[in-house]
Image (spheres, rainbow, N blue to C red):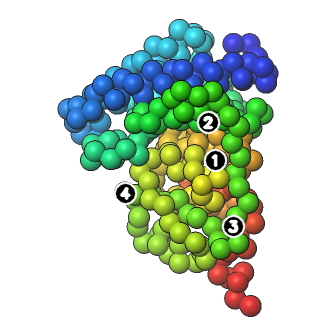
Amino acid sequence: MSSTSNRNLYEIKNIIAEIANKAAKVIMQNMNSPIEIKADNTPVTKADKESDKIISKELLNAFPNIPILSEERPSPQNAFGNNLHWIIDPLDGTKSFIEGDEDFCVCISLALNTKPIIGCIAHPPSGTIWAGGNKIGSYKKNENTNFSKITCRDIPKEGPTVSISKHHIGPKLEKWLSSLVFFEKKKLGSAIKFTLIAEGKADIFPRTSPTYEWDSAAGEAIIQGSGGFVKQMNNKDMIYGREDKKNPNFIAFGRPNWTSFLKENNSG
């Protein structure tokens, strides 16, 4: 692929949506699959591995010259820095998948110049797919529908809805939440949290526990395409293509005025 023009990005969106859909079906065929514990003490299942195989195969068929960074394999030498490369999480939310919950997903994104330029998230249980990026906007489709445009919402007057992790609620997050006036919390176990903001069902997603580039790249691209933002907690941009692949703490949000709901801004 010699160009990442808008026309090409629309084509890429459709291709990766189809690939994510194939991976989603493979995951559903491997429910209750055997579990192993990886060297980093996190679980992996046959479903993760089979999804990784099909995504990697399909991406290489369609884009043979673009390296693939996957959670489930060693990092290739050229998936760093400004280089064009895929960032994939074949099954995000493995803990939810193992527990029998339905908040797991497939994440595929394309990064260039340290930024995700397009991303796709597929939800295997429902067949829903979200895809998009900063240059082409973001879209959602259900199993039997075409893509329709999605956008972040303005924060309702009763306050923001906060999307938080189901498995990673530590003192740091509790402290952060205590500084905010919000309407409700939605707890989910994967990158689906990004999609809630992108389609206007939530307003803020703070992350104060460890994540990696494959956990956030697709979600960041989709949120940006919906008019929203993903920033480090110090308000700097996220950076992809780093050596260790570990993210800083970050916050995803639809509207910058979420800060007006911080208690320090509401004290008078």
Mark 4 burial class by Cα count in 10 Å: few <14, some 14-19, many 20+: some
Image quadrant where one finds the N terminus: top right
Whole-number angstrom distance, CA of label 4 to CA of label 3: 27 Å
Dot 4 corresponds to which residue?
167
Q: Which residue is mark 3?
A: 156
Identified by mark 3, the residue type is: Pro
* Residue at disc 2, secondary structure: strand
Q: Residues within 10 Å of mark 1 (few under 14, many from 20)?
A: many
Q: Position of residue 94 (x, y in %)?
A: 34, 41
The answer to whether the residue labelled 4 contacts the one labelled 3, judged by CB atoms less than 8 Å apart, is no
Precedes in sequence: disc 2 or disc 4: 2
- Residues at circles 3 and 1 in contact by the CB criterion of under 8 Å: no
Q: The disc labelled 2 sits on which kind of residue?
A: Lys
The answer to whether residue 170 is visible is: yes
* Residue type for callout 4: His
Which residue is at a point 53% across and 72% down the rendered structure image? 177
Q: For marks 3 and 1, give the CA distance.
A: 14 Å
Mark 4 / mark 3, whichever is N-terminal: 3
Q: Which quadrant holds residue 179?
A: bottom right
Q: Secondary structure at mark 4?
A: loop
Could you tell me which secondary element the residue under label 3 belongs to?
loop
Disc nearer the start of the sequence (3/2): 2
Q: Position of residue 238 (x, y in %)?
A: 65, 47
* Relative side of 19 to 201, left or right: left
Left or right? Give the position of 182 relative to 100: right
- Say which of 122 and 72 sits in front: 122
Q: What secondary structure is found at the residue carrying circle 1?
A: loop
The residue indicated by pointer 2 is: 140
